[in-house]
Amino acid sequence: MTKEQTGGCLCGAVRYKITAEPFMQAVCHCKNCQRQAGSGWSMILGLPEDGVEITGSVQTYVDHGTSGGEVHRQFCPTCGSPVFTRVPAQAGWIFVKAGSLDDTSSFNPQIQFWTASKQHWIEIPDVPGVPGNPG
């Protein structure tokens, strides 16, 4: 993923431009990501906050991870599309929902998180996984 990327929500009220290289491309199988995405997983890009220009406003739902720490799940207040996640304990980073990219062809996950809670029908054999949080 070396070129500038753009994306946004379903209705177009929230748009973003990515100008930085992601430090992480991942698939998360945690139950909270499954619930927020309405899917078996969430595809995420980890980026420095200053590498993402956002237009439009988002609404934030304050969730709590298994550690008890806050997870700020940000979505479009008009159409409800999940777009970003921010974790206060990881200041300076933003996690972009890769499914909201205008062109997802460059998304190439390098790791899977929370494989212990993945749906039984999901297999991504070429991407290594960890049963919980990384690190």
Image (cartoon, helix red, strand yellow):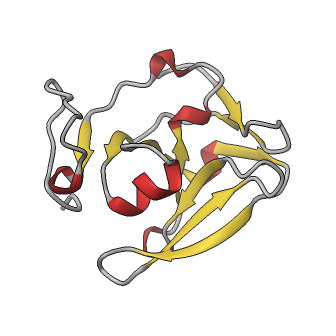
Q: Nearer the viewer, residue 112 or 52?
A: 112
Q: Quadrant of the C terminus?
A: bottom left
Residue drawn at 72 percent across, 37 percent down = 8
Q: Nearer the viewer, residue 130 or 55?
A: 130
When asked about the image quadrant of residue 4, the answer is top right
Q: Looking at the image, which residue sits at the far bottom? A: 68
The percent coordinates of residue 125 (x first, y second) are 14, 26
- Decide: is 69 above or below 135: below
The percent coordinates of residue 130 (x first, y second) are 14, 51
When asked about the image quadrant of residue 66, the answer is bottom left
- Decide: is 5 above or below 94: above
Residue drawn at 60 percent across, 19 percent down = 103
Residue drawn at 44 percent across, 68 percent down = 90
Q: Nearer the viewer, residue 74 or 16?
A: 74
18 relative to 41 in the view: left or right: right
Residue drawn at 56 percent across, 36 percent down = 20
Number of numbered labels in the structure image: 0
Q: Nearer the viewer, residue 74 or 18?
A: 74
Q: Looking at the image, which residue sits at the far top? A: 105
The percent coordinates of residue 131 (x first, y second) are 14, 56
67 relative to 7 in the view: left or right: left
